[in-house]
Amino acid sequence: MKKKIITGGTIATATDVFKADILIEGEKIVQIGVNLDALEAEVIDATGKYVFPGGIDPHTHLDMPFNNTVTDDDWESGTVAAAFGGTTTILDFCLTAGETKLSDAVEKWHKKAEGKAVIDYGFHLMISDLNEETEKELPLLLEQEGITSVKVFMAYAKEFQATDRTLFKAFKIGKETGAIVMVHCENGSVIDELVEEAIAKGNTAPIYHALTRPPEVEGEATKRAIELAHVAGATLYVVHVTCKEAVDEIIKAREKGYNVYGETCPPYLTLDQTLLAKPGFEGAKYVWSPPLRPKSHQEPLWNALKAKQLQTIGSDQCSFNFNGKKQLGLNDFSKIPNGGPFIEDRFSVLYSEGVSKGRISINDFVDMISTSAAKIFGLFPQKGTIAVGSDADIVIFDPNIKRTISAETHHMNVDYNAFEGLEVTGEPVSVLLRGEFIVKDKQFVGALGGGKYIKRQLGKGALSTLEAVSN
Ligand SMILES: NC(=O)NCCC(=O)O
Ligand SMILES: [Zn+2]
Ligand SMILES: [Zn+2]
């Protein structure tokens, strides 16, 4: 395979920023240095650009049945959009609800991805219920499939919500196997009561989605998950943290030395609850859970990211067309499919709102968009950094481009963009996956099925890298 050399760019990792060339041979980075001698290599000129490790999105839902329908982005459109956005690896949630054997669910998820994914991927295993059989099967399946993370929902009572007992069992298995336990922290039972109350009063508009899921029910569930994980001795990863109440619980727990990580998502950092009150049914575009909060919650989230009390940025990609599936809730907000399209803009929105606006450093950006997720979920150092021996997953990013995000130009299979009209600075111009271009000068040049399933190693994730992440 022909060598490639990336020259003239500024390499940024989670710890360094420096000018150097990168020599790629096959799928790997083989040399990093100044004026590298590589006469026979294909030269990629990155002058004036940043050279980042490929983005790692630890939170996606592609082709997932949910809320009586299925998400509109599948493994083709979703991963193509991710590639345009600078993401080279995703970790998607494999749904196990309704399966007698967990391995059947994993097989189903492999089938969804194979032949379609254009970027690398792994799975988190969702657990809604555990019985004698699945409790036995789970540790073996994790080992066999190279899955280092399970996911439990404390919300969505009608679909995925686990009892506290199941949650606790998942924590115990997490402790035994070394798997990290990801939790959606909202009190689903209280939410159901508030939803019924609102509907009974005739309050059916999209804004009531947010008003029936107040921050207190996220804070309460976050605290409960933290304490139960601690009792079981498990490592907890709180997904999509949205509010001060939840952030405060995470900070308190980490200060006590608990093994807790937190993720937030671009919309919670940039958009606010007033969007759900847009005229007519427009607010349905912004219905996802937990909901958007009043603007005052954004600063605590940025501060927690900066202080590394929250470590990662997930997209929580879970898209439904507005002039399609979102209309299921036209007369009843509780029937609006929950989720939004974010996989493509995760990287650019964080760069623009974070680095360009001076809220976070370039190293923090790389950490949040790639490195921390690689460390927490057992992908590091194969992925998540630019180093000799790492996969050549690389984003060449022009920090000077100014553009406006729009559904007219995005690549997701959805008819709206939640960031419509947002002006951003910076854009990925070329993206390499394991040494091959998948996006070249803003054109997709990858191959369907070119993405590879990445097995991770239990015990090589959060527990063994706890220090590395907090350093
Ligand atoms: N977030 C959301 O509304 N949809 C995806 C499922 C989840 O992550 O809760
Ligand atoms: Zn969730
Ligand atoms: Zn999600």
Image: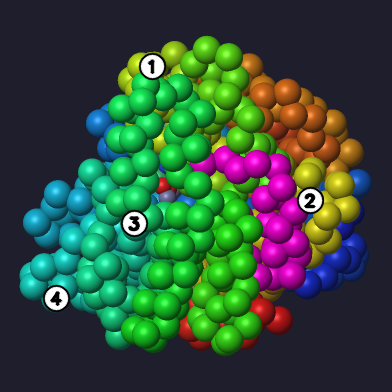
* Span highlighted in magenta in the image: 291-314
Residue 292 on the magenta segment: yes
Q: Indicate which label's residue lies in the foreground, 1 or 3.
A: 1
- Specify how the rendered protein is coloured: rainbow
Pointer 2: what residue?
354
Q: Secondary structure at mark 2?
A: helix
Tell whether 401 sits left or right of 294.
right
Mark 3 CB lies closer than 8 A to ligand 2:
yes
Q: CA distance from mark 4 to mark 3?
A: 21 Å
**Which part of the image, by quadrant, shows the N terminus?**
bottom right
Point out residue 142 in the picture as x, y percentages from the top left corner.
28, 71
Residue situated in front as seen by the camera: 94 or 267: 267
Density class for disc 1 (Cα within 10 Å; few <14, some 14-19, many ≥20) is some
Kindly check if marks 2 and 4 are in contact, taking CB atoms under 8 A apart as contact: no
Type of the residue with mark 1: Leu
- Seen at 28% across and 74% down, the residue is 168
Closer to the chain start, of discs 2 and 4, is 4
Pointer 4: what residue?
136
Pointer 1: what residue?
330
Q: Secondary structure at mark 1?
A: loop
Numbered label attached to residue 153: 3
Point out residue 209 in the picture as x, y percentages from the top left corner.
45, 34
Residue 81 on the magenta segment: no
